[in-house]
Each structure stands twice: as C-alpha cells, then as structure tokens.
C-alpha cells in the first residue's frame, strides 16, 4: 500500500488556509493536508512526526514567528535540509524573494488573487513535486 503524499501548509490566515485547502481538494483530493498556523508549530510537529511531508508551503508574514525565521531554523537542522519548502506568500518584495532563496527555500511563489489562478498554481505544484 502506498501512502498518499502530504503537504503541510503553514499560514496564520484562516481564509488563506481555507482557500489553499479547497484548491488542493479540487485539484488532487488524494493529497493529505496538514494545516499549521505558525512557524512555532512547524518544528515540534516535524520532530514528532513519523513521516516527513512531501512539501511545505510556508507563508512569510505570520505574527509570532515569520516564515523566513522559520525557514532559517528549519534549514539549520540537518534532518530537514533537503525537505522541499516553497515560500507561498502575498509578498512579492524582491528582498523577501532573495532572502528566501538564500535561506534555502526551493521556490518562492506569490499567492494569486483569484481561486482559478490558485488552482492552476496548485496543479503546477503537484506536477513539480510529483504529488500524484
């Protein structure tokens, strides 16, 4: 029996979580989603998990611990160096893009403005990271 791919979504905006979850459900319902509301939750959840996610979508702008600090902490742990992390944020600031890539993000995506575009982005993510 093969295990379904998992995507962990780290975003403190409930509306964004709902939209992202809906897009994944429509595009690829077999993908298991884990929703986390803050960077502070990610590392303890990873260390306590029996199986690492196939992909992490990480927002930059979160209140307690932002995504860039979370990414830096994640990449400083040898166990998570090769874990696929896509920064998925409303920011399109060049400094956020550059810092994300410097800190070890695999990709930087700006959240689309429409649900149709979000579904297209999810399709591309599932193809790029072979989540089918």
Image (cartoon, rainbow, N blue to C red):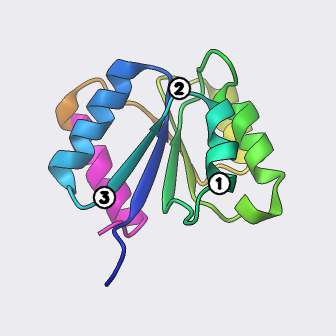
Of mark 1 and mark 3, the one earlier in the sequence is 3
The residue at the point 38 percent across, 20 percent down is 14
Q: Residues within 10 Å of mark 1 (few under 14, many from 20)?
A: few
Q: Which stretch is magenta? A: 117-132
Q: Is residue 30 above or below residue 108?
A: below
Residue that badge 3 annotates: 31
Rendering quarter of residue 40? top right
The residue at the point 70 percent across, 33 percent down is 68
Q: What secondary structure characterizes most of the magenta part?
A: helix
Asked if the magenta segment contains residue 129, the reply would be: yes
Residue that badge 1 annotates: 48
Residue that badge 2 annotates: 92
Rendering quarter of residue 99? top right
Report the mark closest to the observer, 2 or 3. 3
Q: Position of residue 56 (x, y in %)?
A: 52, 49
Q: Position of residue 26 (x, y in %)?
A: 15, 47
Left or right, 119 with reference to 108: left
């Amino acid at each position: 029996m093969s295990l379904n791919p998992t995507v962990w979504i780290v975003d403190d905006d409930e509306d964004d979580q709902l939209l992202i979850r809906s897009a994944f459900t429509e595009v690829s319902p077999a993908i298991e989603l884990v929703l986390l509301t803050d960077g502070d939750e990610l590392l303890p959840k990873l260390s306590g998990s029996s199986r690492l996610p196939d992909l992490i979508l990480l927002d930059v702008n979160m209140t307690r611990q932002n995504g860039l600090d979370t990414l830096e902490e994640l990449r400083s742990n040898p166990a998570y160096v090769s874990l696929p992390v896509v920064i998925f944020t409303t920011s399109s600031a060049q400094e956020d893009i550059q810092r994300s890539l410097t800190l070890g993000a695999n990709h930087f995506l700006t959240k689309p403005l429409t649900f149709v575009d979000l579904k297209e982005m999810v399709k591309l993510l599932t193809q790029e990271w072979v989540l089918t």
